[in-house]
Amino acid sequence: MREPSIGSAAIRFSTDDLEEVAKNNPRASLVDQLFSLIAAKAHAPKSTPGARLPSVRQLAEDCGLSRDTVARAYERLVAHGIVEARRGSGYFVKAGTRRQALPANKPALEGPAAEGRTRWRALLVSSNPSLVTRTGSGSFPDGWQDEASLSGAVRTISRQSARIMTQYGDARGYLPLRQQLQIKLQEIGIHVEPNQVLVTGGAMEAIHLVCQAFLRQGAVKVLLEDPCPPLLVDRMLSTGMEVYRVPRLSDGPDLVQMREICERFQPTAFFCSSVLHNPTCTQIAPHKAFQVLQLAQEFDFTASGGRPGPAP
């Protein structure tokens, strides 16, 4: 079957366009150069929201690239909210993405998840002497740093066999740690064996594994709280998720807006913080947590995040 022809409203590209981008950023990969080229034209004042982009095959021929390079560039554009893929029709400029043309070496992040993320990232990384702690920033107060114990632990490890430090450990994580986690989980009613526990390098790595294992079938729509950690937004977009935000109130998510989003977009998952929400440090009230679970059951999506506990 032949691919649909490109209409008059389509955006066209050529090898000359790509060469111009390469001159401005010669060290960038072909995928990055093509990403910047398409994003710049999508954001140009003359571009029309909904304008059709060439098919993967056509763009590969026009720019002298492989189809794999074009497909990867399109996937990244979709993840950044600049382009949308329509099943059976192709790729189109997403409505609401018109901006000033982008520099070739600095593609912008747009889309529904971008709103507010720059402001929250600035608040998290900025230095504010009046704050006692910087929850979520990854740094601890000086009083929490037990330098003597840390130095002793480093010396103990250095006296051990070099083989222990150079060989790979268990892929599931340090066994004594997994055994301790097994005990903690049992205290809250979750009965597992140590071989069922997987230790990750942080919450973001755990979320990434969840996305890769359970949320990679087709175009996935997910809900995030607003505000939420910028790294969580980055991770969702990098895995190709379509993100929608639910305002976070003092006692949990705004259930009215959450229901409206669920009815309109049918999301697959909701990532939330039930305890010590970052950056507000609030908790979800028990009655609201129950209503979130009811919404999850009604719309058949997964409520992910927070501390597990007994069912309400």
Image (cartoon, grey):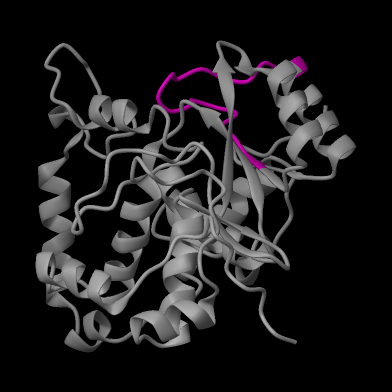
Among all residues in the image, which is located at the extreme right?
A: 298
Q: Is residue 273 magenta?
A: yes
Compared to residue 267, the image places residue 123 above or below, namely above
Asked whether residue 87 is drawn in magenta, I would say no
In this picture, which residue range is highlighted in magenta?
A: 270-287
Quadrant of image for the C terminus: top right
- Which residue is painted at 13% across and 73% down in the image? 27
Q: Quadrant of the N terminus?
A: bottom right
Give the overall secondary structure of the magenta segment: loop
* Residue 207 visible from this viewpoint: yes
* Residue 303 image position (x, y, % from top left): 71, 40
Q: Examine the rendering and report whether any part of residue 176 can be seen.
A: no
Residue drawn at the location 48% of the way across and 69% of the way down: 175
| Left or right position of 264 against 4 | right
Of 164 and 279, nearer the camera is: 279
| Residue at the extreme front of the image, as rendered | 8
Quarter residue 13 falls in? bottom left
Estimate the x, y position of residue 216 in percent, counting from the top left: 64, 65
* 259 vs 222: above or below: above
Vertical position of residue 160 compared to residue 243: above or below: below
Which corner quadrant of the image does residue 292 belong to? top right
Q: Which of the pair 146/240 is nearer the observer?
A: 240
Residue 112 placed where, x, y %? 51, 36
Count of number-bearing discs: 0
Q: Residue at x 30, y 62 (%)?
A: 37
Determine whether, in the image, residue 243 is placed left or right of residue 89: left
Q: In the image, is 311 to the left or to the right of 129?
A: right
